[in-house]
Image (cartoon, helix red, strand yellow):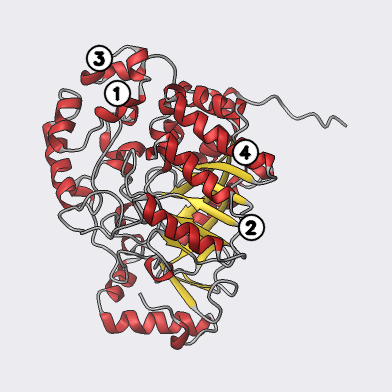
Amino acid sequence: MDHKKPPATPESLEYKNLKQGEFWRHVPAYREIDEATFLDHLWQQKHAVKTPEELLQTIEGLASPEFIKDAEAGFSRAPMAVRVSPYAMSLIDWNDPYNDPIRRQFIPVGSMLLPDHPRLTLDSLHEQDDSPVPGLVHRYVDKALFLPLNTCPVYCRFCTRSYAIGPDTENVDKVSLAKTPKQWEDAFKYISERPELEDIVISGGDTYQLPPKNIELIGNALLDIPHVRRMRFATKGPAIMPMKIITHKEWLDALASVVDRGRSLGKDVVLHTHYNSPEEITWITERAMRMLFERGIFVRNQSVLIRGVNDTPERMQMLVKRLGHLNVHPYYVYMHDMVKGVEELRTTIQTATDIEKFVRGSTAGFNSPTFVCDAPGGGGKRDVHSYEYYDRENGIAVYAAPSVKPGKAFLYFDPIDKLTPDAQARWAVREIQDQMIHEALRKAGAGDEALVPA
């Protein structure tokens, strides 16, 4: 009997075919930009799009005046400021910007915005409730999240920290994080006094924005604490400005020095990044990831499940395979957090579980992400399929977190527009909402007293 598998089809190897050439030249503002200039991280930062006027100047003649007007309405209503790198701008399909996965992540348009879910809050993960000092979140027993800055190289519309990240907007006055070395000292002191804290995530904001000297300052201060065993520098940067790794030698050297010192101490220092769509990965990405790999810097990826970006099995499989091809290890795929102003980007718990089943087995296990729901209210990350009860009709999932906040129940709500018309009508009445939530808690084996308030 012949047990040979047929050769793989060319289509199944599409994940290896990365965008090549000077692809940015189709954008009017970048038509005369040569490769050396486009790869300059300082040029990328200086020419980021931040206003409707800059958007118009960049893509005039590519997108319709109607789209520009629509984006202007979106800018004014968004909870996050807008900043989009030329690299990301050049990857958007301006022939169909409404459906483009990169545009959806970074440039809001008024016509597609949906009302927020009635049970949504600005700080959906209750990070401020778990902050013993400014800029530090201590939720899990042995892990803390250190937030040393509030700026990013790009502002994701779906940011879970829209309550704090970036400048104030027309809709949100931002909470202050720890932004100075003096405030960092308070965080280091807290960590040093808690021997159970072995794992520190350095995020923000975005560590891409830290000067090299501060990468080393923070990294070495944490390495000097004997009980800190693991450290992760988190950044969206490689996905939207990979050229920084290529042309900002001092930043890469600083990160590599912390990684090398950690290894000499028997401590694990890695880079966590954030790719959401296959289109974000080009030949520039490949060069940057190769430089990290050659310096011995291990890279993991955390994606967010976003409607119209990666919410089909085929799209997610392509992303996972493409990341693995570049030695970037898919780690998590998060349910989209329940944050303000981006309801049209969220999808359902059922969608996540279906996609995870499809992706699992399509590549090696260490390159297969875990799909998680970061339980609203501070329950932490739960395997998306590990709910205590899921009311698919009304879009209510109940999670427990016995090792984080025992005895508490946490609720995630599917977007209302994805429900049936009858279910949508029920969500329009506050008393019926309460009844549906009470019933979901009862079926999950939790009483109303266990519910973490929104």
Q: Distance of mark 4 from mark 3, alpha carbons?
A: 43 Å
Decide: is 211 above or below 159: above
Write down the residue under mark 3: 31
Circle 2 crowding by C-alpha within 10 Å: few under 14, some 14–19, many from 20 = some
Q: Position of residue 448 (x, y in %)?
A: 43, 86
Residue 261 seen in the figure = yes
Write down the residue under mark 2: 227
Secondary element at image label 1: helix
Task: Please tell me whether mark 2 or mark 1 is closer to you in this view.
Answer: 2
Circle 4 crowding by C-alpha within 10 Å: few under 14, some 14–19, many from 20 = some
Q: Distance of mark 3 from mark 2, alpha carbons?
A: 52 Å
Q: Mark 2 vs mark 4: which is more N-terminal?
A: 2
Instruction: State which quadrant residue 383 falls in.
Output: bottom right
Q: Mark 4 vs mark 3: which is more N-terminal?
A: 3
Q: Position of residue 406 (x, y in %)?
A: 56, 79
Q: Mark 2 vs mark 1: which is more N-terminal?
A: 1
